[in-house]
Image (cartoon, helix red, strand yellow):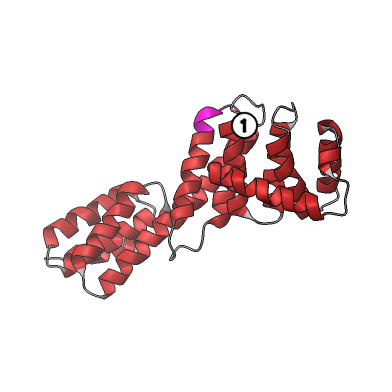
Amino acid sequence: MRRVLFLKLIVGLIIIGCASSPELTKMEPDAAYRYLESQFNKGKYQAAVDGLNFFTLNYSGSALVDSAQFMLAQAHLNLKEYLLAAEAFLELTQRFPRSPLVSEAMFFQGHCYYKLSPRYDLDQEYTNRAIEALQTFIDFYPDYRVRTTEAERLIALCRDKLAQKDYMAGMIYFKMKNFMSAAIYFQSVIDKYYDLEWSAKAAFYLGQTLAADERGEDAKIVYRQFLVKYPDHPWRAKVEIALKKLP
């Protein structure tokens, strides 16, 4: 936090010294905020960021400082600077925990991490951060339905991506005939993402893996569980055929 505040101060001083726009140091807090808000509303997000960094550090006693912090985070978001935006939203919740903007800041922090989430085969650090931040928001504000509904949708998308990552890892190991590792990944999908479509597919290939590893009895158990759990699944016929082939 200290490092972020120091960097903001340096940037703010540079901007104040170089900008051709009105010098914020010569303006009252309310006037400075209105000016920066006008920059933001005109879509001049970088100019807004520059000024708001200065404002949030130098007018910390103003009643508008939490609004300025929120606008700063939104400006970063509009510039698609998602990590900076997430950090700015987090800073609002930490510096101004009683602000009425905290709920929005918590939601948008998770939203920013979601925007940073890459395709399934890459590192999923930000996907996990998104889930954690959005679930925390839901836990704190369960009745804020407009946002919680969207947060639940984003969590579902993140979980689907994580499930696909584990499923595809299992498939790679299965094709390499590394059956122990394949079984671990398929079982992980079944255990952690039981409510997703990937779980049914993982169950089928877990049976295939066990059968290929000469663990026929275990494969039978998995196939029979599949038929009970997914009676109408399109792969039912494939499972029944695989089950009949086992001795």
Mark 1: which amino acid?
Answer: Val
- SS type, badge 1: helix
Q: Quadrant of residue 24?
A: top right
What residue is drawn where x is 79% and y is 52%? 17
Whether residue 140 can be seen here: yes
Viewer-closest of 204 and 15: 15
Label 1 Cα crowd, 10 Å radius (few <14 / some 14-19 / many 20+): many
38 relative position to 12: left or right: right
21 relative position to 125: left or right: right
Whether residue 153 can be seen here: no
What residue is drawn where x is 67% and y is 26%? 100
Rendered view: 27 above or below 131: above
Viewer-closest of 3 and 104: 3
In the picture, which quadrant includes the N terminus?
Answer: top right
Extreme residue toward the top, this view: 98
In the picture, which quadrant includes the C terminus?
Answer: bottom left
Q: Which residue is mark 1?
A: 102
Extreme residue toward the bottom, this view: 176
Rendered view: 154 above or below 103: below
User: Residue 92, image x and y in percent?
Assistant: 62, 36
118 relative position to 92: left or right: left
Bounds of the magenta segment: 138-144
What residue is drawn where x is 61% and y is 41%? 89
What residue is drawn where x is 48% and y is 53%? 126
